[in-house]
Structures are given as structure tokens and as C-alpha cells.
Image (cartoon, rainbow, N blue to C red):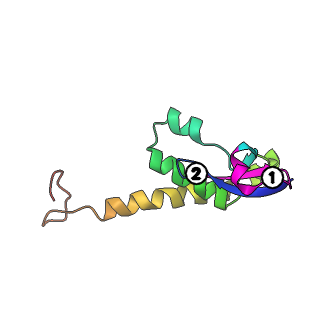
Amino acid sequence: MREVEWTDDEGRIWAKLIPDTERDQNADRGISIGPIDVTPLAVENEWPRAFAIRLHNELYHRRVFNSVDPRELRARARDVVAAIQRAAKVDALKIINLPTSDDGVTILGDE
């Protein structure tokens, strides 16, 4: 078995295990080894889809995978926090770049 990178239709990147003889194009049928799927949390907490996908991909890049021993995963809490911060950074920049009124207060509806 070998590990391949596969991107689903929503843009989430997955690590999959496929047989050595299988073509990379068939990775969607492989065994998912990560990252941890945040979809249940995203639905429960009504996260925007774009944020959930960014977080998923950040977890992928940090290799926070479901195949990791739970004790090791707890020890990698900093990686999870960093992934959340990185995924939220785009939203923070959008807020910082909102148009403001002359006195520096953002007015809803100002363009």
C-alpha cells in the first residue's frame, strides 16, 4: 500500500492509502487516513463551508490524521490550534479590511 494525495469535489485534500498497483486517479476509492474530518463539528456549529474546508486542508498540511495514536494527537494540540488560527486568518483579514467611516467606525451598508 502507498499513500497518495486526493482532492475531493469541494476542494478538501485527503491522504488515502491505495494498493501499490492501483493508479493515483482511483484514490477516491482508497482508505482515508486523514486528516480528521471536521464536517460533524462544522455542521453542529454552523461554520461557513469555506472555513471548514480551509481548516480541513490546514489539518492535512500539518498531518493531523485519524490514523495517529490518540495520545500523540493530544500532544499535537498546538498543531490543531495553529490550523484553526490559519484557517480563521483569512476571515480576520476581511474584517480588518472592511470599509470604515471617517471616524474609524465601521458602518453597516457603507461601501
Residue 92 at x, y = what percent? 40, 60
Residue 23 at x, y = what percent? 76, 55
Q: Which quadrant of the rendered structure holds the C terminus?
A: bottom left
Measured Cα–Cα span from mark 2 to mark 1: 21 Å
Crowd rating for badge 2 (residues with CA inside 10 Å; few <14, some 14–19, many 20+): some
Question: In this rendering, would 57 be left or right of 106?
Answer: right
Q: Which mark is residue 22?
A: 1
Region in magenta? 13-28
Q: Nearer the viewer, mark 2 or mark 1?
A: 1
Tell which of 60 and 73 is nearer to you: 60
The answer, for residue 76, to whether it is visible in the render is: no
Of the numbered discs 2 and 1, the one sitting upstream in the chain is 2
Give the residue displayed 32% in from the left and 64% down from the top.
96
Tell which of 15 and 84 is nearer to you: 15
Q: Identify residue for label 2.
A: 12
Q: Which mark is residue 6?
A: none
Residue 41 at x, y = what percent? 56, 38
Element assignment for label 1: loop
